[in-house]
Image (cartoon, rainbow, N blue to C red):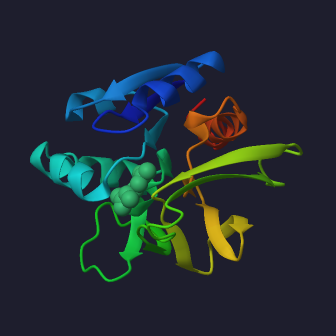
Amino acid sequence: MKIGVLSIQGGVIEHIKHIESLGAEAVEIKNIEDLQDIDGLILPGGESTAIGKILKERNLLKPIREKILSGLGVWGTCAGMILLAEKIENENNTYFSVMDIKVRRNAYGSQIDSFEQEAVIDEISKESIPLVFIRAPYITEVGPEVEVLCELNGNIVAAKKDKILVTSFHPELTENLSFHKYFLSMCNNQGELQ
Ligand code: GLN
């Protein structure tokens, strides 16, 4: 199994290391050609406006969107979640626009813009998982087919729909591999991608 990690900003190396330590192959995605033969795609964090601009310049928005719509498993962490959302609060702009959620950027404000908390997320692991938030967004609305995986202090911070996974936080910045394991099983699950 081969997982692409969008290599523009953010925890690219950290995602690659986690995927590799689970025994799968990981490749950096910088251009259209890199998208061939991948079984899943991770969109790391960073600054969504900057990543969006570069995606546009490299003509990557459309081909990646098409791949997601035709069934490629995708996981957006933090800014990656913003890139996947169909709606962004107070902005007309969207990027891949494939996930039926509305997100609020920098939702925790400047006072507590970065923090760490633990939570048990039943779908992911029986053990408590460390969640690292960095100028994080959260989800303010979900469509009817979206499965909420984690709500923290009343805010939705992880969700899934079909083969699209989004998290407000950064599992790649912790030692815990549960989310990466879960994503690999999502990419493996549905038939042709074995
Ligand atoms: N605040 C960033 C944004 O709005 C996301 C932060 C992150 O990815 N760590 O794009």
- 192 relative to 102, above or below: above
Q: Estimate the x, y position of residue 85 in percent, counting from the top left.
A: 42, 67
Residue 125 horizontal/vertical position (percent): 82, 44
Which picture quadrant has residue 65?
bottom left
Number of numbered markers: 0
Q: Is the C terminus in the top left, top right, bottom left or bottom right quadrant?
A: top right
Which residue occupies the foreground of this view, 188 or 146?
146
**Residue at left offset 50%, top offset 67%:** 111
Q: Residue furthest right?
A: 126
Does residue 91 sit above or below 132 in this rendering? Answer: below
| Residue drawn at 28 percent across, 79 percent down | 91
Relative to 183, is 30 above or below?
above
**Residue at the limit of the structure toward the left, as seen here:** 57
Residue 30 position, x and y percent, is 24, 31
Q: Quadrant of ligand 1?
A: bottom left
Residue 70 visible (yes or no): no
Note whether residue 87 is visible.
Answer: yes
Q: Residue at x 79, y 54 (%)?
A: 121
Residue 83 lies left or right of residue 128; in this view the side is left
26 sits to left or right of 7: right
Q: Position of residue 116 (x, y in %)?
A: 65, 50
Looking at this rendering, what residue extends furthest in the front direction? Answer: 111
Position of residue 149 relative to residue 177, above or below, is below
